[in-house]
Image (spheres, rainbow, N blue to C red):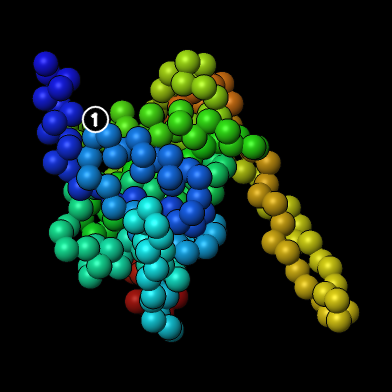
Amino acid sequence: MKEANAVNAVKKMKILLSNDDGFMAKGLACLAGVLGQIAEVTVVAPDRNRSGASNSLTLDSPLRTTTSANGFIGVNGTPTDCVHLAVTGLLKEMPDMVVSGINEGSNLSDDVLYSGTVAAATEGRFLGLPSIAVSLAGPRCQYYETAAEVAKRLVLKLNRDPLPKHTILNVNVPDLPVAELRGFQVTRLGTRHIAEPTVKALDPRGRKIYWVGQPGPEEDAGPGTDFYAVNMGFVSITPLHLDLTHYKVFDQLSGWVESMGKGD
């Protein structure tokens, strides 16, 4: 009875879904289907793949929308554009939560700085909404249903027990059947080695072109990190704080300011 009441309560929620793989992505459709069991879902996502778009907003051209047969809304912009547009002008009612994903591939460690998946969740939090970013960690990405089930459980938890302001959850789910997951771990971001070199090539006209190289391999990937959890078969849940201020260096910089004021 308690579980039924909880589901009924969440059914009243309005959840905004977005991603960076595009509004026709398999992971987004899977997530919408599962979360649609417990909430009213609206999908606003890029009209094409915008992986690596980070927190960019489109300011030099207008945004346009298209609606697919399944009701998903595509936007000719970034993941951040999609959430911003949805919350500040497109939707008639404010959503209660933003969920971004399911990303095709992991968003671990330094990836969060570039990830459009994480950026969509970040924009939701900037606009005052609880937000979760969900990624499926694997080279081929088969078990989207697993990540969708994890997302559903987290939505239920977040709805009952809200997190502090300026916090989002970055969730990475091993690409395994649900029954093979080893559990859940709260983790910190690991770190990578420096990125692989840029790949140089020539276009058909003989002009130089460059492809951004692959991310660097794991560096800090021991117990407690997101890398370690996923590699061991656990769902990694990393709370990210949106206040980027590094308070521990205040004293050192105060010394700089004092000396600069004296002309040093």
Q: Nearer the viewer, residue 175 or 183?
A: 175
Q: Nearer the viewer, residue 6 or 132?
A: 6
Position of the C terminus by quadrant: bottom left
Question: Which residue sits furthest front?
Answer: 69
Location of residue 201 in the rendering, given as x and y in whole percent from the top left corner: 84, 68
State whether residue 32 is above or below residue 7. below
Q: Is residue 55 visible?
A: no
- The residue to which callout 1 is attached is 157
Location of residue 13 in the rendering, given as x and y in whole percent from the top left corner: 17, 43
Location of residue 233 in the rendering, given as x and y in whole percent from the top left corner: 54, 22
Hey, which quadrant is residue 218 in on the image? Answer: top right
Hey, which quadrant is residue 202 in on the image? Answer: bottom right
Q: What kind of element bears circle 1?
A: helix
Location of residue 6 in the rendering, given as x and y in whole percent from the top left corner: 15, 27
Label 1 environment density (alpha carbons within 10 Å; few <14, some 14–19, many ≥20): few
Q: Residue at x 18, y 32 (%)?
A: 161
- Tag 1: residue type? Lys
Q: Residue at x 17, y 37 (%)?
A: 11
Compared across the picture, whether 199 is left or right of 145 comes to: right
State whether residue 236 is above or below residue 202. above
